[in-house]
Structure formats: structure tokens, C-alpha cells
Amino acid sequence: MRHKAYHEYLIVFLVYFILTLIFTYPLSMKPGIVFDYIDYLQNIWNFWWIKKALLRLHTSPYFTSYLFYPQGTKLVFHTLSLYNSVLSIPLQVIFSRPTVYTILFLSSFVLSGFGTYLLVLYLTRNRFGAFLAGIIYSFSPFHQEHLSEINIASIQWIPFFCLYLMKTFWEGKVKDAILCAVFFTLVSLCSWYYALFLVLFTCLFIAYHLILREKRLWDPKLLKNFGIIILLSAILISPFTYPLIKEALSDSSYLHVPSFRLAGLLGIRYPEGSLTFWPAALGYMVTFLGIYFILKIRDKKTHFWSFMTIFFFILTLGPYLIFLYKAYPQIPLPMAILQKIPIISAIRYPYRFMVLVMLGLAVMSGFVCKMFTNSLKGKIILFFITSLIIFEYLSIPLPVPSSSITIPKIYGIIAADKGDFAIMDVPLNNYCSAFSMYYQTFHEKKIVGGYISRTPPSALEFIHGNQFVRLLLNLTSFRLFKKDKIDLKKDVELLKEKDIRYIIFHKDFLLRKRPSISLSLWKGLIPYSVSKTKIWPQYTDSKHRGISPKDAFATEAELQEFIQFITSILGRPIFEDKDIVAYKIVKNGKGTI
């Protein structure tokens, strides 16, 4: 009997694997491609840094001197996603880092589907409902959209945690409690966000059954197993949480940031083309199944899933109501209260609660399927519903670039230059710094800037304290400098003292490649992008997927003026092509040729 079950699981696993290859096309066919998404480049750097810190430097990965040179920076609150980064180490021996990233990204789909299948099969004893639930959770727009954020895409262990939490509650086995703690640890090492979400989920589960006056809650055996989950989880994650707690107690000022990326209520105008670009989307058919569940299922214990789904959906809306793209800060929501709680206040993207909304809808859909599988007519209806869900969620080809990022030739010159020195990529904004971090995985020299999740103020002391470096932050800094010229001689001399040997000016990051996308289109694409009471104006060019200030780009004339200014200070460049101008600083003069 057990052999038959394993055979069934293997078939289900393989079907989810095939679906993953289809849903992620063409990425699944060219896994080594390098995207120009800044969070993706940051994660590639994470893989490089964890391997270098653990295997070559034999040091803690929670501090690096390779970013924000010369003082370095703490990485305690940076999203290292240790599960993915550590797992990448042996894979990097065989594959390139971009290929490793793709392998881990694709595995999250297969395991998410399989884990949800096991959870819903346990709850419903219905194979078809379990299989459909796996499709809904694994291939949801929320999951597909996070192509560039492996930590947020790593949703695969959440269903396993829920499965063994349920089994611990209903069956009371110590083995299930141990596995629940193990999967909580895996979730934590993927994303601390998700660990926090599961703590809320567990509290909600217990509170719901307290409301139902479930006598099982007071069973000494169950209390012992819950104690095992808490104690074992604490032991397993303590080596990783200790640095976080220590830093939070000493300086947590940069941990807490205002919430943004909120899900707008009834902003349901799907964008043209890919539903994947709208991670707050539930899907019409899946929403219908959820509503049908609420109206037709009468079992109070089962209705925990509708209660949980509605609760977390409200949290995705953020601290106040957003209705039809308009914010109403005078109408507070539960998140406004939760944000006053320490740790929870660090959640800056409430829409990420969508991961539990999708899990809840997947489970509810599984229960609905169970109602229809007893007749031929019902099975035909289910086949039709499943086809519609797949059609609605299928978004191929995935928005991946047709060609990979290439390493500019200047970094080959820098890599060949022996010695322990630093370089500076200009402009020193997040976008350029993400590319700089990716290039660092090739040349392995220290860099002045950096793009990390939470930047401690100490990391910016040199950048803000050196007037020459500060004016290279962005065009706005240069424009202000032109109005009030300052003597920069001492600041440039300090670069020489610190052995910041190369300055690479990226022309291509300062020129707009195509007209701005209109604000109305951005509202359709990303309806959750709301800050306070105003929707952010958002701009894009061929290399910029994220958000830029209105004046982030230069005209050709202004760009040339910027380059001439740098040349007047550093001397003739040692390298120039259509995208880059590079300067070398030596201690006995200006630039060299």
C-alpha cells in the first residue's frame, strides 16, 4: 500500500515538473540567461558572497567589507535567503550562478505544487482537488511575478509546514511536531517575512479553534507537541536569529520603513498581456471557487480556511483602505494596529501576505472540487474549471530578456590588476549599484557603493562625507553642485589614500532609452504601488524595470558636461566605449593612460 502511495506521489511530482517547464517557458529552456532586474542581480551577488565568506574568507556572512568601501556594511537585515544561498554553493561547482538561480527558482514551483497537493489531499482525501490546489498555489501570479526575488519566490515549504501543523493538531504524533519545526526552519531560511507570516497563521489557527471551543486544544499530548514545535524551531533558527536580535537591540532604526506596495481593493482591471505582472491578482475563476466555498460549505472546522484567507487578504491592503486606485488614510485597517507591534513593523510590503491568501484559496478550491467528483457531470465541470484556471494563469512567454547581460571589457582589465584595492561605479544609485555588485562577482574587488535590503547609516558615512563622491550619487547631486561650486582637491586626495583605484562612469544608466510609460498604464500594471495618498509617478527605459525619480535621466548635452567635469578632475580616461568611461586614479597624479 505504501509502495502504491509513493508511486502516486512520484507521478504527481513529475506532472508538476512538466507544468513548471511549460509555465516558465522560455526561462526553462535557457536557464543561464542573466536578467537586468536589480533584485535578481542582488541575489546573484548573494550566492557569490555566501560562498566566498564561508569557504574562502571563513568569516560571518553578516558583514562584508566588499560593499560600501572603505567602512563596509552589516548584512544582518539584508535578504541573504540563506536556504537558497547555501544550497547554491555545491551547485556553483557544476553550473554558473545564473543557471543555479534558475534551478532554484524552478524547483520552488515543483515543490510548491507537490506540497500543496499533500496538504489538500490530507484535508479532503480527494486527489483531483489536491492536484488543482497545487496548480493554483504554485502557478499563481504572485509566484510567477517574483522571478527576480528568489527569497519571495521560495514559497515551497509553507504548505509542508501547514500540513504537519494540521497533522500535529489532529493526530498528535511527535514525529509530525518535529517535521513541523523542520519546515518552519526551512521557511525562515528562505524568507524571514514568511516565518513571521506563519507565526501569525499559527496564532490565527489556535484562536479560531478557541472560538469553536475545541477541547483538543487542552489535550496534554497536544500541548506537549506544540511545545516541541516551539522549542525545536527556536533551537534550529537561533544561530541565524541571534545576529538579527542583537542588531535590533543595538540599532534597529534602519529596520523600520513605511509600508508601500499595497493591494488596492477593486482595482480589478487586469493589464493588457500578462497577468503575471499583477501579483495582487487572485484570478477570476479561483475567486469564484473561493466564494462558492464560503456559500456552500457548512463545516465550521473547514471554514478556518475562509476565515484565514479573508484575514490575510485584508492585511494585503495595508494600514488603510485603497479603493479604485484612491487611498483613504482616514479609514484604518487591521494592519495599522499590527504595524505598532515590534518586528511586524518591519513589514514594508503588505501585499506579500498574498502568499497565504493564495494558499487559502487553493485549499478552498480543493474542498469545492470534492463536491463535484462524485458524478460524470461534476467531473466535466471540474475539467472545464481547471482548463480555465490554467489558461488564466498561463503567461508565456515569461518576460525574460532575449539575451544575457555581458561583462564590460573594463572589468577584465580591473580583474587582471593585482592587489587589494577598490573601485567605484557611477552613478551611485541603487540601479547602477546592483549592476556593480554583479560585476564584482567577476572582478572580485571591493566597491564603494552597494544595493542591499536595509542599509545601515554607518555604511553611507564615506559616500555622504566625501563631497566628490557625493556629487556622483546621481544627476540631482551634480546639478546642485553646479550651482554652488566647491573645492574638491582634498576629497579626491582621500580617494587616493583609500586606494579607490578605478572610477567607472556608466553613460548607459543615465540616458533614457525610450519614452516614459504613462502613469495610467502603470496603474494598470502595478495597482498596489501607493505611497501615502499619492500614486508614485513611475518611469522606465529599456534597462529599467523599477521606479525612477522624474529627473533621473540626462540629456546628451548634460551627460557630456558630466563626463567633462569628471575628466577635468581625474584626467584622461583609460577606457571608453559607447556605454562606459573609465578612469584610473594613482597616488602620484591624476588618471593614467
Image (cartoon, rainbow, N blue to C red):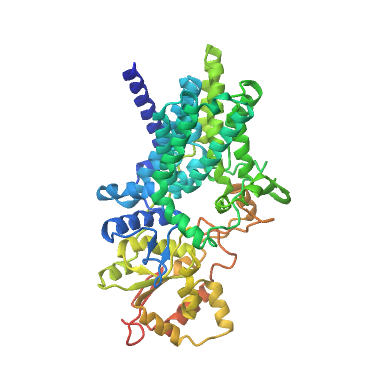
Q: Position of residue 459 (x, y in %)?
A: 46, 68
Residue drawn 56% across the image and 17% down it:
371
Q: Is residue 294 visible?
A: yes
Please indicate whether residue 488 sits to the left or right of residue 271 in the image: left
Name, please, the residue furthest toward the top: 375
Q: Is residue 32 visible?
A: no
Image quadrant where one finds the C terminus: bottom left
- Name which quarter of the figure residue 23 lies in: top left
Nearest to the observer: residue 110 or residue 360: 360
Please indicate whether residue 576 sits to the left or right of residue 547 in the image: left
Q: Position of residue 288 (x, y in %)?
A: 62, 28
Q: Position of residue 218 (x, y in %)?
A: 55, 28
Q: Is residue 170 above or below residue 440?
A: above
Nearest to the observer: residue 24 or residue 108: 108
Total numbered labels: 0
Name, please, the residue furthest toward the right: 330
Q: Position of residue 333 (x, y in %)?
A: 68, 45
Q: Is residue 7 above or below residue 145?
A: above
Residue drawn 56% across the image and 82% down it:
482
Image quadrant where one finds the N terminus: top left
Nearest to the observer: residue 583 or residue 135: 135
